[in-house]
Amino acid sequence: MSTSTTSNGASTVTEPAPRSDRAGAMTRFLENYALLILTALVFVFFSFFPASSATFPTLTNLNVILGSQAVIAMIAIAALFPLICGFFDFSLGAVAAMTQVLTAGFMAKSGWPLWLSIIVPILLAGLVGLLNGFFVTKLEMSPFVTTLGMATLISGIMVWYTGGQTIVSGIDPAITKFGSSRLLGLPTVVFVLLFVAAIAWYVLTHRPFGRSLYAIGSSSSSAKLVGIRVNRNVWSSFVIASMIAGLAGVLQLSRAGSASASAGNDLLFPALAAVFLGATAIAPGFFNVIGTIIGAVFVSISVSGLTLSGASGWASSVFNGIALLAAVGLSTYLGRRKRAG
Amino acid sequence: MSEDQASDADGIDRGGFVAATIGADASLAVEITGLDKHFGGTKALSNASLRVRRGTVHALLGGNGSGKSTTIKILAAVHQADAGQLRVFGNEYPLSNYTSAIAQQAGFRFVHQDLGLFEDLSIQENFALDAGYPRNSAGGVDWRQLRKRVAGLLTEYELDIDPRRPIRDLRPADRTIVAIARALQDQEGDELILVLDEPTASLAAHESGRLLDLVRRRSDQGQTVVMVSHRMQEVLSVAHDFTVFRDGKVAGVLTDASPTEDQLIELMAGAAVQSLRPSGSVSHRTGKLVLEMSEVHSGPLEGVDLQIHRGEIVGVAGLVGSGRSSLLQTVFGAVQPTSGTMSMAGTPYSPSQIEDAIHSGIGMVPEDRGRDAAFPEHSVSENLALAMLKEYSHGGWMSRSRERRAAADLIKGFKVKVAGPRALFTSMSGGNQQKVILARWLQRKPLLLLLDEPTQGVDVMSRADIYSVIREAAASGCAALVASSDMSELHALCDRIVFLAGGKITGEVAAESIDVDSLTSLVLRERNPTGASAVTHPDSSASVQREGGTT
């Protein structure tokens, strides 16, 4: 709206209407793809920036970026589900750490076979989501405090379980082999991520369930009155989120080869930054899967570039913080502008 | 009796105006003349006037859209008048730059239907948040002084409650009294004017009796009160003077009078009220039963019996709080009845959730469109599709272009003025938004459409469109149940109108057999139109006695 009026004012006398139409389409395109373009620019910058040009654009580094980014991106996709219906889940980082520890621990301490050591922790992650959903929907507890409390609780239990030690031995080598394996020149975990992302995209855009979540996020009372079971859907979103985060934890174990109780929260905040950055792209104003993936790539490329340019360790935290703030600001602004029409 | 005591007890010159039959200018608290107000093309007020005598209870009466609420909102500076003069206690206040701060300074204190109390906070904190916290020498809150002051005020208003109790513990009438006491707490020396907007709308009869007794006693002690209410008997029991609005004009002023209910209703309904469309609509009623309710109890509903037939448009008339919305919500499965039975199209019907109602072929257009129907940041197409998600899922995929094509057809079919299916829902006017909500349900070809205030916040032109949409749906066999506080709407739209009072259907009329005025008076009386006295007000006998004592 506002852009078309300014372009009208700036345009010469001839045919203002088509010009403003074209300007409108142009701004829409820029809005939808700004993050993608920005990501490409950052990539090009670090590829030619003298301090990082030697190490940044190498195949090895790109594989490191993609591999480490896959786990964060998967937690971001997990966080999408409750966020779309308007609920934060702060326990997802802790849930990922939990499955990472339990998968390793079940093999190392209890001698369980690999498949069982993967499935049981992911089911336990689902149980955490079930509890979160129960507290938030049935007991109407604040999702913020509930999931934060759950995160602290899980972390505490994991410290007890590991005795504060890092589990390094007794882990089935098959899983670490998978974590470092490559497919078509890319880390295999990236394909796991893309597979999960594709399913999430399909569910969120082409299943009545996913579209119900967007409806709930827009207005839960309107959603209720068009026959959407609000509580059940919100509850499901917490379970799905926890299970995806659980899978992310298993992937993290496959890449790291070890597990400690303290790993969780480092993953959550870059993931949230990716989700909110994602809401500024593709479908501006709405949380979406493709935007989230682009957001995750943007954050990891930027952090890697900064690190390889010789920036200190704190730089990545500063960058994540700024990216999260900017992303929340932008997506709020876009949402509000949408609402205002 | 009580008046004599009161005039002895206080020094305000009450005796003067009791003697005066027609108030002289010096005794006027509020004087409004030549008040005009337009909303777009519609004239809400035209040359309206109001004279409120000091120390009296002045009732503002009138049907919906008569202009009484607009007048109050102008006094509260919610709306700005187009023209008019305002004098308060003899001082002139120009209405062209009238603000809520000036209203406060002039002496107006408003207590609205929504009392604006903080439920979880204590009574004393509710007082302090309005007037400021008293400080002690250290700069902290002086809780003891606050408690003493509020306790004193509560005693003055005949409430024997600890000021530290939270508001949520109070009975409904006591909350209203607390709100009144809070509004008037800074009345020291200055004379204030208390404006009560529908103070009893949400109160049960015995509760409102207590409140009104208090209002009357305060006025006997010199308090000037302006009161808006729909409930005839209550107004008659408490007010000295009456100003009746009709179609934005003053239809009658009764000073120090005790009119009968019939006289007031005649003034309010008048002969000039015109329906938007003549009700000569074809009745689409057929013999087939769609919805049958028997002895349904749910919230305020205490045994509702109702039958709706295919193609029939049934209106529900009743005062605010009569349970019109509860009736619709019960049918829609949003609220479960505590007892009674329902059937849809001949089969037993007991929805445990809204989904069940939708699957049984029911749709609902709620009263508050912005909160309960709209998905504001989504497109028109998405807003339409969200009621059809399962139907739009084909072979595991949901085609947006297919949805947009369907939306485009609906936009054309329902004459919605909008840029296209992709346009944002909020980019449309209220009337067009409402058409989209109607289309959302009608695309499902429902058996029964529930409409709660279907044309609230809708312009006149769209209103006619919405009526014809509903009638066309009825012509194709859809039944409709319409709850509305607008009598001309019920009259223009419905085949049959049922009256809801005291939680029961107290009677029904065929729309063609009655005019809007008679319909209005039937609802205002809260009585069975067949003449059998169905509703009796417990406090009506008391009020008659008091009226007799005053005159």
Image (cartoon, coloured by chain):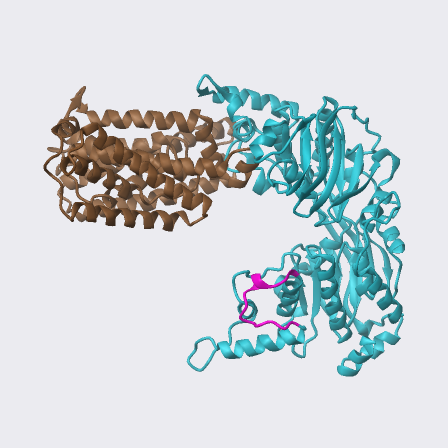
Left or right position of A40 against B394 = left
Who is closer to the viewer here, B189 or B143?
Answer: B143
**Chain B is shown in which shade?**
cyan
Which of the 4 image quarters holds residue A83?
A: top left
Who is closer to the viewer here, B178 or B109?
Answer: B178
Which of the 4 image quarters holds residue A293?
A: top left
Q: Examine the rendered structure and indicate whether residue A179 appears above or below residue B156.
A: above
Left or right position of A221 against B191 = left
Judge whether residue B199 is colored magenta.
no
Residue A247 percent across, percent down from the top left: 27, 33
The quadrant of the rendering that contains the N terminus of chain B is bottom right
Judge whether residue B166 is colored magenta.
yes
Which of the 4 image quarters holds residue B416?
A: top right
Chain letter, brown: A
* Residue range (magenta): B159-172
Residue B402 percent across, percent down from the top left: 51, 19
Residue depicted at 14% across the width and 31% down the height:
A61
Q: Residue furthest top?
A: B395
Residue depicted at 57% across the width and 63% down the height:
B169
Residue B101 percent across, percent down from the top left: 61, 65
Who is closer to the viewer here, B527 or A193?
Answer: B527
The quadrant of the rendering that contains the C terminus of chain B is bottom right
Left or right position of B520 against A245 = right
Whether residue B90 is visible: no
How many numbered marks appear? 0
Residue depicted at 78% across the width and 25% down the height:
B284
Residue B168 percent across, percent down from the top left: 57, 61
Chief secondary structure of the magenta portion: loop
Whether residue B480 is visible: yes
